[in-house]
């Protein structure tokens, strides 16, 4: 019996859009912060996961829900 070690590929998803993993040295929080420059709503997004499949660890960014404004 032999044991093999495989590295899971990380996938980051927000609102149906998949983001490229900038590298294993980035934590999921750092990845969120990196992409928040293009998607400002990510600054307050929650990170769910990872959901592990055969070869992928999938992290999902969920936008914080809440009402804004004086009529909230």
Image (cartoon, grey):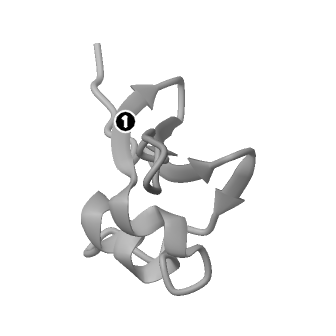
Residue at (29% x, 22% y) in the render: 2
Image quarter (top left, top right, bottom left or bottom right) of the C terminus: top left
Query: Vertically, is 21 above or below 53?
Result: below
Most extreme residue toward the front is 71
Closest to the observer, 39 or 70: 70
Residue at (53% x, 53% y) in the render: 12
Residue tagged by mark 1? 48
Closest to the observer, 45 or 71: 71
Expressed as whole percent of the image width and height from the top left, the position of residue 8 reads 43, 44
Image quarter (top left, top right, bottom left or bottom right) of the N terminus: top left
Expressed as whole percent of the image width and height from the top left, the position of residue 39 reads 59, 73
> From the viewer's perspective, is 45 left or right of 21?
left
Expressed as whole percent of the image width and height from the top left, the position of residue 27 reads 25, 65
The residue carrying pointer 1 sits among few (fewer than 14), some (14 to 19) or many (20 or more) residues within 10 Å by Cα, namely: some
Residue at (43% x, 54% y) in the render: 70
Closest to the observer, 29 or 23: 29
Query: Vertically, is 48 above or below 47?
Result: above
Closest to the observer, 8 or 48: 48
Most extreme residue toward the right is 16
Query: Vertically, is 33 above or below 14?
Result: below
Query: Vertically, is 44 above or below 7?
Result: below
Residue at (28% x, 26% y) in the render: 3
């Amino acid at each position: 019996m032999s044991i093999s070690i495989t590295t899971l590929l990380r996938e980051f998803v927000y609102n149906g859009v998949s983001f490229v993993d900038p590298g294993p040295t980035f934590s999921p929080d750092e990845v969120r912060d990196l992409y928040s420059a293009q998607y400002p709503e990510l600054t307050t997004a929650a990170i769910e996961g990872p959901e592990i499949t055969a070869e992928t660890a999938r992290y999902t960014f969920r936008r914080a829900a809440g009402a804004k404004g004086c009529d909230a």
